[in-house]
Each structure stands twice: as C-alpha cells, then as structure tokens.
Image (cartoon, grey):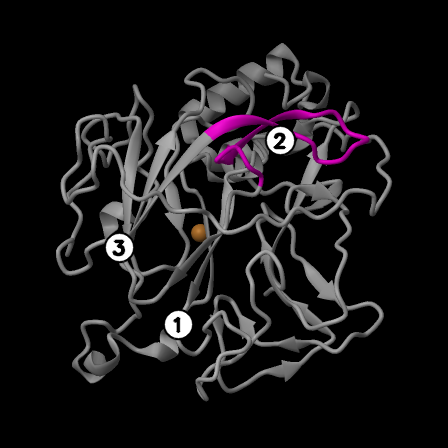
Amino acid sequence: MSTSNPASLPKLSRRQSLQLGAATTAVGLLATQELVTPVQAKDPEPPKTTPFVVPLPVYPPKQTVSALTPPAGQYAESGECGRAPHQRWAEFLPQKFYNLNVRQAQHSFHPELPTQTVWGFDGLVPGPTFVERYGVPIVVRIYNDLPANTVGFGSPEMTTHLHNLHTASESDGFAGDYYSRTKYGPTLTAPGAYVDHHYPNCYAGYDDPRYHATNGDPREALGTLWYHDHRVDFTAPNIYRGLVGYYLLFDDIDSGNELDTNPKALRLPSGVGKYDIPLVFDDKVFDSSGYLAFDQFATKGILGNKVCINGKVQPFFKVERRKYRFRLLDAGPSAFTSFTWSPAAAAAAVAALTGASPTLPTTATCCRRP
Ligand SMILES: [Cu+2]
C-alpha cells in the first residue's frame, strides 16, 4: 500500500533498530518515547498546493435501510463478532437501521497531490453524517471490510466509538472490542464481519425519577457528536487514515428546523449539508511525494504540514447571503486549533463541546478549543 513513502519514515541504523527493539521489549512505552525522539526524521517538505481551488465536500445525511439482513437482535448473530447482548433492548427497540461499511478507498486531498489510499466509513473521508433525534433508538451495523493484511501505519482490526453518547457498554466501541473476519480483541469472544451498535438516543438522567416526565434531563442534550475508530494502540493512526465522521442529535429545542413554531425551539440555521455544515479539521503530514505519512513511534504526538477540512487541503465553500450553522471538530491528532473570523463577521457561539445552549448564545469573533 502506498500511503506512506519509505523516504519519509525515520531512518534507523541497524544498531538503532536493535536498541529500540530491546528497549521496547524490556521496559515498554516510556523508554520507547525517549529513545525515538533523537532519531526522528526531519519534517518532510510536501509539494506546494494552491489554496481555495477545491470545493469543500459536504455530504448529505446518511440514509437508512428498511431492514438489516440478518435482522438486528439482542444477541449476536452468526457472522457478527462475539459481542455481549444488547442491554435494555426491548426498552429501546430500534426504529431506524443503517449499514455502514468500513473500507479502503482512493481519495484526493487536493488536485496537486496524488490520489491515494485511505480508510473510510463507507469509503468516505470524513464518513457520512448521521442525523438522529432523541427518543428514536437506532442500530448501526458496521462492517469491517478493510483488507486483512495491510502495511504502513494503523490496524485493520477496528472498533467504532460514538464519542460522548450515552451508550451501553457492548455498543460503545470499547478499545478492546476490535474485530475483523479473522481476528478479535480481548473483550470479544469471536471474530466477525460486522458488529451491531445499538444507540438508544436518550438524555442523561433517563433513570433519574426527577426527569421521568421528559425521559431524562433535556439540559444534558448533546447535539454535535462524532464517531471514530477506537482500536487500542492504533486509534490515532486509524483516525488519521480517515476513520472519523459526525453524528448529530436533535430534540424539540435544537430541532433542526429554522422555521419551527415551537416557542422553545432555537431555530438555528437548518438543513444538514445545506445550511448546517459539519466541518472536520485535521492536520496531516504529507511527504515530499505528496503521500500521507505517519510516524507510529512518535507517541508524543504528530503535527501536520497541511490542514485539511472535510478531507481536503484548504478548500473553499460557496455560501448564500444568509445565516449558517457551522460545527467545528478538531479531529487531531495532536494540534491545538484556534478559529478566527476574517474579516470579523457576525457570529454567535451557541455551544461548546457538544451541547447547544438554549439560553446563552454569545457573540464571538473567535473561538478556541481548550
Ligand atoms: Cu472519542
């Protein structure tokens, strides 16, 4: 596979390689970090790329299927990896079903860089956007169709975590729940082609008697979530290869309808993919040939030499003369990102982290991710 050019990898002499191997075996990760630092390659010089020539990709919402085959159930089917039974299945019977295929694909980050191999949910970088609603439980069947034997960084045995959603443990994409058709992690009992994730889409406080009338505490609503690979030891490189996507949750306050007549509704700019725009920011290291590089031994972090938004280097986005809702996600792996409006535009920061505030929109010219 060609995602990493050998010229961009750290050049270890045979002696250094042996030292590294011995240290890793003998005393583990900490010593590895210290040893590797002096032998890391210099930053590669990537090809120049012209800014603002490639349009920002904004995908429409992920589409449901009418039924899954075999049907989704509380217990793992044959063919599914060995997960524990879904908890409170009958209480949160799924009303919507999805197939999601994790696969290798060809991707262009920029027309002046070579088309290259990535990993993506449905082969897309970033993956499709889920548009969901509180009170509507769903099942997402996630197939691992990555090639079994790959070279380069990352691991093709993967697991998917939906960040911050209140999800039962068997559906949470625990780091040890990684699977493929032939291999499986320590917290599963068998390999499998897929796994079903059961997402109840309920508020926090669901079991608290104080919030029975509202099926949980609406103040705890989360509106902007993301899903990503979570494989133990390989989360950073697997996300870097493309395994990241948005999951949006609406309710009757953040209702996803800017014309909502409900007096409680926020009436934020609506239409996911049209006026409600999810943005994934990440920085990547492109090597001198324009291919993605990743130093898997750089456990202190990795800083890119180009910034991507929704999988493109410095894209442009044509807007209408109206209000937009932008969602900003720093998908890493290591950089801190500061966002500034230029020229200073009328902007309201309506949420931090994942929840939209029904009461405290504040004007902002800049927002910073802590
Ligand atoms: Cu996460």
Identify the residue position indicated by label 2 in the image: 294
The quadrant in which the C terminus is found is: bottom right
On the picture, is 100 further left or further right than 166?
right
Q: Is residue 230 above or below residue 24?
A: below
Identify the residue position indicated by label 1 in the image: 251
Is residue 201 or residue 2 the one in the foreground? 201
The quadrant in which the N terminus is found is: top right
Identify the residue position indicated by label 3 in the image: 95
Q: Please say if the residues under marks 2 and 3 sit with CB atoms less than 8 Å apart.
A: no
Q: How far, Cα to Cα, is label 2 from label 1?
A: 39 Å
Q: Nearer the viewer, mark 3 or mark 1?
A: 3
Mark 3 vs 1, N-terminal side: 3
Residue pictured at 54% horizontal, 85% vertical: 360
- Structural crowding at the residue carrying mark 1, measured as other residues with C-alpha within 10 Å and reported as few (<14), some (14–19) or many (≥20): some
Residue pictured at 49% horizontal, 69% vertical: 256
Residue pictured at 31% horizontal, 70% vertical: 203
Q: How far, Cα to Cα, is label 2 from label 3?
A: 40 Å
Amino acid type of disc 1? Asp
- Structural crowding at the residue carrying mark 2, measured as other residues with C-alpha within 10 Å and reported as few (<14), some (14–19) or many (≥20): many
